[in-house]
Image: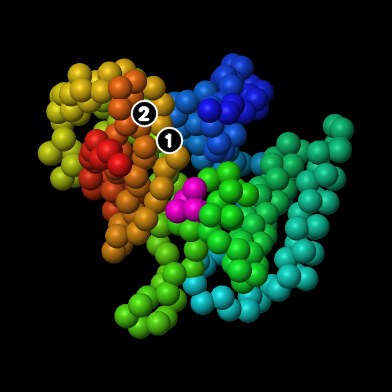
Amino acid sequence: MSTQPASGSCLSCGRPLPEQAGRGRIRHYCDATCRSAARRERQRSRQPATTDVKVSLTSSTRHVYLDGIQEEANGPAGLTARVTSASDQLVTQLSRTGAGSPLAAMVAARELSAVSTEALQASVDAARAAGHSWKEIGDVLQTTRQAAFQRFGRPVDPRTGTPMTKVLQPDAGDRTLGIFAEIAASRWEPARADFGERMQEAVSADRLADGWAQMIATFGAFERPGEPVMRQLGTRTVVDLPLRFEAGDVTGQVTFDADGSVAGLFIRPVLPQ
């Protein structure tokens, strides 16, 4: 099995990252705990703060994921101009010494991130229109073809022939990683923090601990999570998360209601192929 060199230090805790075995997305965090901590920090940084900087903190309109590719109000030329403008604004803010505001730089970085996401979607659309497979796209994005499709695909409803609007919760993958990071650290109550009312009643901290203990008794010590894959089930978002133990692999599954609360949590052994 080939290895990839470490990408440097963990972006959350600063510790050196180990070498990465096999192909896949280059690691930026030690484990799911650090990834979850970074996600929570990003969420806190998005909260508006009282300041004299008169800069709009409204994020760009979310791109609608539809399979029938329609002409966007902002075509390629408009998107290129927005990427250039956002990039120039960020460079301007970061190059200021003393007179500039860190908050203004943060807003500029946020806008560049938003328009870059739109540019990535447009690039994937163009690749599909040119006949490239989801496997090829996944390889470029250093992820699986299923994960690439779940994020960028535009499915058509076979019953009606009309585009299907995705209602996947964008942070469901990170939240699932966070939940299992809490479970792996034996922090049962934090793991239950987002449980819905029925889940709170059905899955106590003791039951959660018992279930995890059974996994360890069967498969040995927990090693690391894999890449979460999201899918839509009615109005709910379902996330499948590969979990690697020392003596076997299992799949953790978390279901989120439309309001963001956890409606289901399962751990299933991976069937041998």
In the image, residue 196 sits, relative to residue 184, either above or below, namely below
Residue 263 screen position, x and y as percent:
23, 47
In the image, residue 20 sits, relative to residue 238, either above or below, namely above
Q: Residue at x 77, y 64 (%)?
A: 80
Residue 45 vs residue 225, the one in the foreground: 225
| Residue 221 occupies quadrant | top left
Q: What number of labels is visible? A: 2
Q: CA distance from mark 1 to mark 2?
A: 7 Å
For disc 2, the marked residue is: 244
Circles 1 and 2 in contact, beta carbons < 8 Å: yes
Q: Residue furthest left?
A: 202
- Residue 179 sits inside the magenta stretch: no
Residue 81 vs residue 105, the one in the foreground: 81
Magenta stretch, overall SS: helix
Q: Amino acid at mark 1?
A: Gly
Mark linked to residue 226:
1
In the image, residue 27 sits, relative to residue 71, either above or below, namely above
| Residues drawn in magenta | 144-148
Residue 219 screen position, x and y as percent:
26, 23
| Residue 8 occupies quadrant | top right
Q: Is residue 56 left or right of residue 214?
A: right
Q: Residue furthest bottom?
A: 160
Q: Residue at x 29, y 34 (%)?
A: 250
For label 2, the SS is strand
In the image, residue 240 sits, relative to residue 245, either above or below, namely below
Q: Residue at x 63, y 79 (%)?
A: 71
Quadrant of the rendering where the C terminus is positioned: top left
Residue 115 screen position, x and y as percent:
67, 57
| Residue 93 occupies quadrant | top right
Label located before the other in sequence (1 or 2): 1
